[in-house]
């Protein structure tokens, strides 16, 4: 069913290719593979739902670097539940969701000045599972300190009551499929023109 839908998009010229992962390799897409436009690479989570072998497949498909991040907890089953790149090079993330090696990878690529570490309260409120559009950060009802920290960095927090959706384990980012992003350098330039 999904393959037929993507083949139809290809036939209509909306996408160039439909690729499949090798048997036994899993990658749960936007939830575990997030484009960081400021850094020009993907952050890809693996562990509970996506396979570490999917990293090479992402690099091959998009021709872009991929930073793999191993998730340390079933509670944070997708990268988007604990990691959110923001405009301007900032990253909101929950450190306890990552293995020590993955935390080192984040800290090696994101300067301390650009890291916003979410608290356990922020993570429990599903606020890291947010959508960033320019200066707006759309998220579930946020604890006051998080709203203040984001505002101090120039972000306008837009809170949405996502309580019913959070019962299934996700929030704002899980409810989207971003179509306004380009991960191929030539396509990104063409989209901007």
Image (spheres, helix red, strand yellow):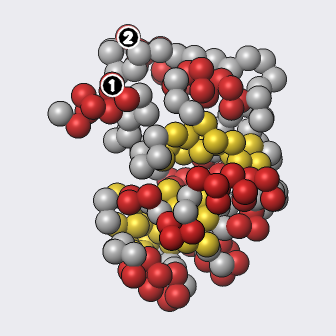
The residue tagged 2 is 11
Q: How many labels does the image show?
A: 2
Name the spot of residue 34 as percent of width and height, x first. Answer: 54, 45
* In the displayed structure image, the side of residue 4 where residue 79 appears, left or right: right
Task: Give the labeled residue for mark 1.
Answer: 186
Sequence-wise first label, 1 or 2? 2
Q: Is residue 118 left or right of residue 13?
A: right
Residue 129 falls in which quadrant of the image? Answer: bottom right
Closer-to-camera residue (159/107): 107
The quadrant in which the C terminus is found is top left
139 over 150 or under it: above or below: above
Disc 1 to disc 2: CB gap under 8 Å:
no
Report whether 80 appears left or right of 8. Answer: right
User: Which one is in front, 22 or 111?
Assistant: 111
Q: 5 or 27: nearer the eye?
A: 27
Where 72 sits versus 143, above or below? above
Residue 71 x %, y %:
76, 53
Quarter of the rendering occupied by the N terminus: top right
Distance CA(mark 1)–CA(mark 2): 22 Å
**Residue 117 visible to the viewer:** yes
User: What residue is shown at x 68% (from left), y 26% (from top)?
Assistant: 56
- Please rate how many residues cluster around mark 1, counting C-alpha atoms within 10 Å: few if below 14, some from 14 to 19, many from 20: few
Whether residue 70 sits left or right of residue 59 in the image: it is right
The residue sitting at 40% across, 67% down in the picture is 137
Callout 1: helix, strand or loop? helix
Instruction: Write down the quadrant of residue 154 in the picture.
Output: bottom left
Which residue corresponds to the image point at 50% horizontal and 66% vertical from the top-left?
114
Q: Is residue 92 among the parts visible in the rendering?
A: no
51 over 36 or under it: above or below: above
- Picture coordinates of residue 117 (x, y %)? 61, 72
- Which residue is situated farthest in the left direction here? 193
């Amino acid at each position: 069913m999904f393959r037929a839908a993507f083949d139809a998009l290809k036939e209509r010229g909306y996408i160039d290719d439909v690729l499949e992962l090798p048997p036994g390799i899993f990658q749960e897409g936007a939830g575990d593979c997030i484009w960081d436009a400021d850094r020009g690479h993907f952050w890809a989570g693996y562990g509970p739902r996506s396979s570490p072998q999917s990293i090479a497949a992402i690099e091959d498909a998009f021709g872009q670097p991929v930073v793999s991040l191993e998730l340390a907890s079933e509670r944070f089953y997708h990268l988007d539940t604990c990691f959110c790149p923001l405009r301007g090079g900032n990253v909101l993330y929950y450190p306890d969701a990552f293995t020590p090696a993955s935390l080192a990878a984040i800290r090696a690529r994101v300067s301390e000045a650009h890291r916003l570490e979410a608290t356990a309260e922020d993570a429990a409120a599903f606020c890291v599972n947010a959508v960033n559009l320019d200066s707006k950060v759309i998220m579930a009802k946020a604890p006051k300190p998080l709203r203040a920290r984001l505002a101090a960095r120039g972000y306008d927090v837009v809170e949405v009551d996502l309580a019913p959706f959070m019962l299934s384990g996700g929030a704002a980012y899980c409810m989207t499929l971003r179509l306004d992003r380009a991960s191929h350098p030539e396509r990104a330039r063409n989209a901007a023109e």
